[in-house]
Image (cartoon, rainbow, N blue to C red):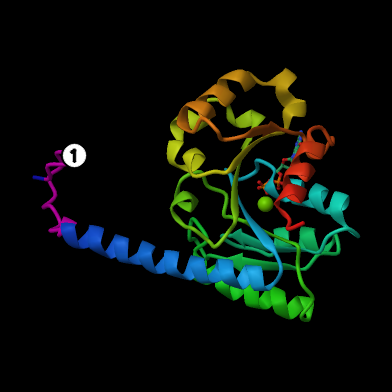
Amino acid sequence: MCDSCGCQQDPVPINKEKVVDVHEQLLAANNEQASANRRHIEKMGAVALNLISSPGSGKTSLLEQTIERLKGRLSIGVIEGDLETERDAERIRKKGVPAVQLTTGGGCHLDAPMVHGGLHVLEHMAKGKKFDLIFIENVGNLVCPAAFDLGEHRRVVLLSVPEGSDKPEKYPATFRSADLVLVTKTDLLPYFDFNLEEATSAVKLLKPDLPVLPLAAEKGEGMDAWIDYLLALLPR
Ligand SMILES: Nc1nc2c(ncn2[C@@H]2O[C@H](COP(=O)(O)OP(=O)(O)O)[C@@H](O)[C@H]2O)c(=O)[nH]1
Ligand SMILES: [Mg+2]
């Protein structure tokens, strides 16, 4: 009998030490490629941000509005991650910014080797022109992306008002790994039982100096603080 759940199936023999070992090797290889990506991004002249959130919390909308505000001032490139389709990359290209779509074919996160390929395509699209900011929109998921360094300089986790203010407590590893938390869709606060104070204190309990910025990208609220955060990352 299986001693995990009590079912009648014969347990599959698993060498737990071996599983842990393979997992560690995978993460170590990923981290090595991530460091190479960071150097690559710096050679491209850029600072990179990895955007992580549940599906639909407003990552692509935030990028569209960010591009609107920064176009003509900064050179931006975007790497999009999704299970399927070019949809998000097409939304970004409509704003006049080069965008590479990485499709994982079912994979729940981007990893550093995929982003490495994406950087080369982005460079090719820009025909040697330097970038100031590269955004990497991760696959929508609050679990798996946290474990994978992509070579970003800053990790931004988005939490939208309709998802509920309990999410930092439920997904602590992801929030703990962030450099910035954006509470998005704050225009919906009057319609949802979302407690901004509770969400902020849950984040601070995980990581006391983690900044939390509330914003509503489509309405423009809070966008000035986000843009200031981005500008402060650039070399003077
Ligand atoms: N009310 C409101 N809706 C938003 C806002 N930002 C995005 N949305 C909507 O949320 C949905 C998902 O947005 P999207 O950017 O595609 O999310 P992603 O899956 O995280 O990239 C879309 O219908 C957007 O119009 C916002 O600030 N306020
Ligand atoms: Mg998106």
Q: Is residue 26 left or right of residue 102?
A: left
> Which quarter holds ligand 1?
top right
Does residue 34 appear to the left or right of 163 in the view shown? left
Q: Nearer the viewer, residue 67 or 105?
A: 67
| Residue in front for this viewpoint, 8 or 161 | 161
206 or 58: nearer the eye? 206
Which residue in the protein does label 1 denote? 5
Q: Residue 143 at what x, y percent from top left? A: 46, 45
The N terminus lies in quadrant: top left
- Which corner quadrant of the image does residue 49 belong to? bottom right
- Left or right, residue 51 beside residue 174: right
Q: Is residue 76 visible?
A: yes
Give how far across and how far down residue 20 sits, in percent. Answer: 24, 57
Instruction: Say whether residue 195 is visible.
Output: no
- Which residue is painted at 76% across and 63% down in the image? 132
Q: Is mark 1 within 8 Å of ligand 1?
A: no
In the image, residue 48 sits, relative to residue 179, either above or below, namely below
Three-letter code, disc 1: Cys
Magenta-highlighted residues: 2-16
Q: Residue at x 77, y 27 (%)?
A: 187
Give residue 134's position: percent from left, percent from top: 69, 61
Question: In the image as oriented, which residue stretches furthest toward the front?
Answer: 236
Whole-percent x, y for residue 68 in the image: 87, 51
